[in-house]
């Protein structure tokens, strides 16, 4: 017999192919080095069933001639098998097994044996550290150390052996399940036991539940027990909001004695319909589930849970998930998954082929989830959602003194409970494929021209480097052709505003005033207006942590040259001066901008998580307001702007929204905006941004109605309704609106 030492140098392996749900990287580099005869066989390999780290075996390298390539040797067979393991090539490994093993075991079963072991242990990478090669006539073996890096249990280590036999002139791998892990010989298997803590709740900042545990009741039928089918159909149709035909289709052709699920309702709904649901043939089955009260208030911000998506299954398993849990898919549910779910308790142990417990390998204790208290004010959120209804648009409300998001609404809305009710598949499909894109969070991800809401930025630049004053006067005849007849533009007021000051121009939203301001700013420096826009927080993400957001776009000469290979023109500045051209903003950005105006010029980073609370009401995290900038506006100039914004809602002569806020007990300051979208013939986007109470600002809010018309006609009345609803005032009906195309 001869015994050779092998090097234990570590190498990198490729990703394992999709034969398993867990991608395994087997790091391996086998250096076949010299060997010499040995008087006795090596002792049997030892294992570490406890999973505790052990030091690799020491091996003394001895010279060995490289095998001749045309001679099949145990060195080459062993090397090929282990390298194939490194590549995840189970097919090649299978081809090296002895013929009798391949007759007994299919390639699929062989691969599955590896997959099951690695998946059960949440193994991410495997490192093989070869020690010695031993040859004894028709037998050979490689002693090696294997280290499994798991997602849950840390490192599992064991000494192992790869056995080979010679049949005729060929060497083969004499494989058994112990080759994977020594303790798996003789039918022993890994068993994993999970302890799953309850998912923690999501609350608004006052403690009202936004995502809580509840009961879902699956309502179904046992066809053979139905006595009065018409009465059953009528009852289920009312309870589940389904047609007779849809209900019948669920149980048609099914076995008479089976329970056939028809639809899901909440535990409260089950109690409300308790008597009706006792008809012969109707049966109910309960389960605990995640629920979103008030039909999913704040669905875009709170998000929802669902079964683990196939594309992320592996990653969740490696984190210690059993695989059948409901996990956060969007919103706070997704962002706070590890916070809300806590950590599963997991035990790994061995069981014999007969089912006898053989001992534990590793264990991880469970950790309870922690509750998330969002910054949302559920009452304000509900009013925003009610006002917006099924319109395409968004509402964002911020605390002007902190940047906390008090309402974040995108329309059309949806009920996030449909994602936790299995029978609501048709409702989910309807939402997913709705042309109005209810799942799109327009509040943070939608990008729109700002329209006249941007004039707040323009007047700030005019009062600053533009060198103008509040009393600088312009003449508006209703049309403007200072750049030539071919570039003629109009004011929204076709009769014109006549002589009008800069301050009144903001209150009246006179386009001609701002066209002229744009020309003057461009003549001074074409970068002034883009620079001011960026200083107001536009053209970049706000830094909101919990939700993905768009950056919007603030064009400037450098951007235009790089994008279109064209020089910036005075016309570009003129267009931007009224919030048109290439400029794009999000509702969140405009809400933050007007909040900074309200609070005296401070830009805060918006945030959605107020605090995280662990067991025993221990505060694990409290979000502190974060100042990220200051408006480049002096206190005196800011006073001018705020007076003009108050005039928008109170000046009966020139205020563009005075008629919409007349009689409101809560003082509002703000700015209307009518933004022209790109496609020809499309209706304008309607904006109203403002703050309230104007005499002591608490909230700043941006309201967008997509393709709905003028700002004063649509967005301003919506803004008023939200304010009225929040303060418990009578709701003023909306004016007759033209349906969006």
Image: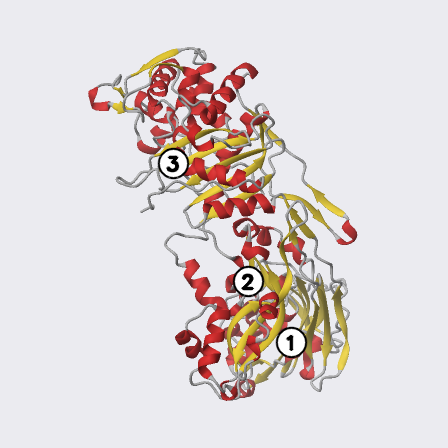
Q: Nearer the viewer, mark 3 or mark 2?
A: 3
Q: Nearer the viewer, mark 1 or mark 3?
A: 3
> Regarding mark 2 in the picture, which secondary structure is present there?
strand
Vertical arrangement, residue 581 with respect to residue 178, above or below: above
Query: Which numbered marker is on residue 306?
Result: 2
Distance of mark 1 from mark 2, alpha carbons?
A: 38 Å
Q: Residues within 10 Å of mark 1 (few under 14, many from 20)?
A: some
**Residue 575 or 204: which is nearer the viewer?**
204
Q: Nearer the viewer, mark 1 or mark 2?
A: 2
Task: Please give the residue where the numbered disc 1 appears in the rendered image.
Answer: 179
Q: Is residue 174 left or right of residue 220?
A: right
Whichever of callouts 1 and 2 sits on the residue coming sooner in the sequence is 1
**Residue 301 or 379: which is nearer the viewer?**
379
Task: Please give the residue where the numbered disc 3 appears in the rendered image.
Answer: 713
| Quarter occupied by residue 506 | top left
**Residue 146 or 459: which is nearer the viewer?**
459
Vertical arrangement, residue 354 with respect to residue 676, above or below: below
Look at the image and tell me whether residue 175 can be seen: yes
Question: Which residue does the image show at 45% across and 11% down from the upper left?
Answer: 469
Q: State the image coordinates of residue 741 (x, y, percent, origin top left).
A: 31, 47
Distance of mark 3 from mark 2, alpha carbons?
A: 40 Å
> Regarding mark 3 in the picture, which secondary structure is present there?
helix
């Amino acid at each position: 017999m001869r015994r050779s030492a092998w090097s234990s140098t570590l190498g990198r392996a490729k990703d394992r192919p999709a034969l398993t749900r867990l991608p395994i990287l087997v790091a391996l580099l086998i250096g076949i080095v010299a060997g010499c005869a040995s008087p006795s066989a090596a002792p049997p390999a030892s294992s570490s069933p406890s999973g505790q780290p052990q030091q690799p075996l020491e091996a003394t390298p001895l010279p060995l001639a490289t095998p001749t390539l045309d001679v099949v040797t145990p060195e080459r067979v062993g090397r090929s098998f282990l390298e194939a393991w490194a590549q995840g090539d189970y097919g090649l490994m299978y081809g090296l097994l002895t013929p009798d093993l391949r007759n007994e075991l299919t390639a699929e079963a062989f691969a599955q044996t590896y997959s099951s072991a690695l998946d059960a242990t949440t193994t991410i990478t495997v490192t093989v550290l070869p020690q010695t090669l031993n040859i004894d006539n028709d037998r050979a073996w490689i002693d090696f150390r294997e280290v499994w890096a798991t997602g849950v249990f840390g490192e599992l280590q064991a000494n192992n052996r790869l056995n080979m036999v010679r049949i005729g002139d060929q060497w083969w791998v004499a494989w058994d399940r112990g080759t994977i892990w020594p303790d798996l010989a003789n039918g022993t298997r890994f068993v994993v036991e999970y302890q799953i803590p309850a998912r923690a709740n999501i609350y608004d900042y006052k403690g009202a539940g936004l995502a809580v545990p509840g009961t879902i009741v699956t309502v179904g039928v046992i066809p053979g027990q139905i006595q009065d089918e018409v009465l059953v159909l009528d009852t289920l149709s009312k309870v589940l909001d389904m047609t007779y035909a849809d209900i019948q289709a669920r149980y048609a052709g099914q076995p008479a004695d089976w329970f056939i699920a028809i639809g899901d309702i909440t535990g409260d709904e089950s109690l409300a319909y308790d008597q009706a649901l006792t008809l012969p043939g109707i049966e109910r089955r309960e389960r605990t589930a995640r629920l979103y009260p008030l039909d999913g208030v704040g669905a875009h911000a709170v998000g929802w849970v669902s079964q683990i998506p196939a594309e992320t299954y592996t990653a969740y398993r490696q984190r210690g998930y059993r695989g059948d849990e409901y996990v956060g898919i969007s919103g706070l549910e997704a962002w706070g998954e590890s916070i809300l779910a806590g950590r599963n308790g997991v035990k790994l142990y061995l069981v014999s082929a007969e089912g006898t417990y053989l001992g534990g390998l590793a264990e991880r204790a469970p950790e309870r989830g922690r509750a998330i208290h969002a910054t949302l004010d559920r009452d304000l959120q509900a009013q925003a959602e009610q006002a917006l209804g099924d319109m395409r648009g968004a509402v964002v409300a911020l605390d002007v003194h902190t940047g906390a998001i008090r309402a974040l609404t995108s329309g059309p809305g949806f009920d996030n409970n449909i994602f936790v009710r299995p029978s609501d598949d048709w409702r989910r499909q309807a939402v997913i494929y709705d042309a109005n894109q209810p799942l799109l969070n327009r509040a943070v991800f939608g990008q729109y021209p700002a329209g006249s809401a941007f004039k707040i930025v323009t007047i700030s630049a005019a009062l600053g480097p533009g060198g103008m004053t509040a009393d600088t006067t312009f003449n508006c005849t209703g049309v403007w052709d200072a750049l030539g007849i071919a570039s003629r533009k109009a004011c929204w007021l076709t009769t014109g505003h006549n002589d009008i000051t800069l301050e009144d121009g903001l209150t009246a939203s006179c386009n001609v005033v701002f066209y002229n301001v744009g020309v003057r700013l461009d003549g001074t420096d074409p970068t002034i207006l883009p620079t001011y826009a960026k200083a107001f927080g536009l053209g970049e993400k706000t830094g909101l942590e919990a939700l993905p957001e768009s950056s919007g776009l603030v064009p400037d000469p450098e951007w235009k040259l790089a994008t279109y290979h064209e020089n910036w023109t005075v016309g570009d500045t003129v267009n931007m001066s009224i919030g048109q051209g290439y400029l794009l903003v999000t509702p969140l950005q405009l809400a933050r901008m007007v909040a900074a105006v309200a609070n005296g010029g401070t830009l805060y980073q918006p945030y959605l998580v107020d605090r995280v609370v662990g067991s025993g009401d221990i505060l694990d995290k409290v979000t502190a307001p974060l100042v990220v900038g200051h408006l480049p506006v002096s206190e005196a100039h800011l006073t001018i702007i705020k007076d003009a914004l108050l005039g928008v809602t109170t000046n009966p002569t020139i205020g563009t929204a005075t008629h919409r806020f007349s009689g409101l007990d809560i003082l509002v300051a703000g700015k209307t905006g009518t933004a022209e979208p790109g496609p020809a013939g499309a209706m304008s986007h309607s904006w109203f941004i403002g703050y309230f109470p104007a005499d002591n600002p608490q909230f700043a809010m941006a309201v967008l109605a997509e393709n709905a018309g003028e700002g004063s006609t649509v967005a301003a009345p919506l803004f008023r309704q939200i304010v009225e609803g929040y303060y418990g005032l009578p709701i003023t009906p909306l004016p007759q609106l033209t349906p969006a195309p």
